[in-house]
Amino acid sequence: MDRFRAMETFIRVVDTGSFSSAARQLGVGQPAVSKVVAQLEDWLKVSLLSRSTHGLTPTEAGQRYYERARAALAEADEAELTARGAGVGLSGVLRVSATTTFSRIHVVPHLPTFLEQHPDLSIDLVMDDRVIDLVAEGIDVSLRIMTSLPDSSVVARKLASGHLLVLGTPAYFERAGVPRAPADLEKHEAIIYSQLPTTWTLTRDAAEESVSMRGRTRLSAAEGIREAVLSNLGLTVASNWMFTPELARGAVISVLTEWSLPALDAYAVFPTGRMATAKARAFASFVETLLNRPFPYHEQDTERA
């Protein structure tokens, strides 16, 4: 029995709560996962999992083994990285999650550079605007754009500072007028992003003004918001990350720039309860470096090549 493979398999089963989910993440059949866990229990001479109609949960012995096995694999990962040199020798599959628009603009175009640096590494990028369960989905690191961390238990690293902006196309503002004060926003056709609030507090020095955005179009995905804005349908409140290319070339402009909305920063979020892997940390560092360079990033990539 391959002890490291057995440890990894058991950890995936506990994380996902089922043999079938663990099998999908490992890229093997469910019977193979069941067999490995059975062999592990036979070798340890102890039951590691409780099986019920609600799924699989670790026994008391299984929970202790899970915690030690996870720590052992993390230490082995670190030992290999140290022996080969920091940032060298990353291998296996790295599962990353990020929102669709952020991935398309800021991540996917630069994957060739990262993969060239690590030829033994593969990336499985889950592009989804929903906040997903990192443990259940087997995610190593999630790239999220947030105003703040949801709670202190989240293991996260801030990668770059961003901003919420009131923005639209020049054509829309030519037709509807440019808002001069926050109260003017209530007279405009707003494109509502259901992932964000509709009431905002804008600040300028010691002044604060709250406004409620109104509009006939509500969309659940950032890609829809982008298309609606670029179609001159209305204005919206969105992050600079969502419209970086268009802001850079003037296809979209921000208004009320003397007023501030809450910060909306980029974070790397790691699964709670486990040590971040070396490859997850390396990818987070890569994205951090990328986001803190002037846009468009590809110009610097070309100059460096």
Image (cartoon, rainbow, N blue to C red):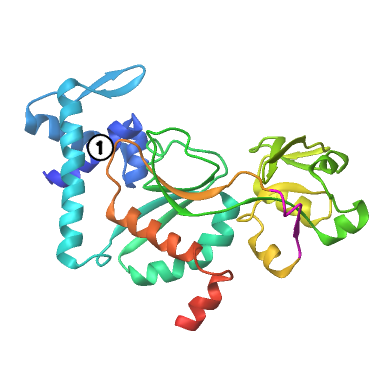
Quarter holding the N terminus? top left
Q: Is residue 26 above or below residue 115?
A: above
Picture mark count: 1
Badge 1 element:
helix
* Residue 127 locus on image (x, y percent): 53, 49
Q: Does the segment drawn in magenta span residue 129?
A: no
Query: Residue at point 34% right, 22% down?
Result: 55
Q: Is residue 112 above or below residue 49?
A: below
Query: Residue at point 18% right, 27% down?
Result: 62
Mark 1, Cα crowd under 10 Å, few <14 / some 14-19 / many 20+, is: many
Residue situated in front as seen by the camera: 16 or 232: 232
* Residue 303 locus on image (x, y percent): 50, 83
Q: Is residue 202 above or below residue 110?
A: above
Q: Is the magenta stretch mostly helix, strand or loop?
A: loop
Query: Residue at point 57% right, 47% down?
Result: 264
Pointer 1: what residue? 11
Residue situated in front as seen by the camera: 34 or 249: 249
Give the left or right position of residue 80, taking residue 165 as reference: left
* Residue 44 locus on image (x, y percent): 8, 31
Q: In this view, does 279 lie above or below 130?
A: below
Residue situated in front as seen by the camera: 54 or 155: 155
Kind of residue sitting beneath label 1: Ile
Residue at the front extreme, as displayed: 206
* Residue 286 locus on image (x, y percent): 40, 63
Quarter holding the C terminus? bottom left
Q: What stretch is highlighted in magenta?
A: 251-259
Name the quadrant containing residue 270: top left
Residue at the right extreme, as displayed: 175
Q: Does the segment drawn in magenta span residue 256?
A: yes
Give the left or right position of residue 76, taking residue 249 as reference: left
Name the quadrant containing residue 57: top left
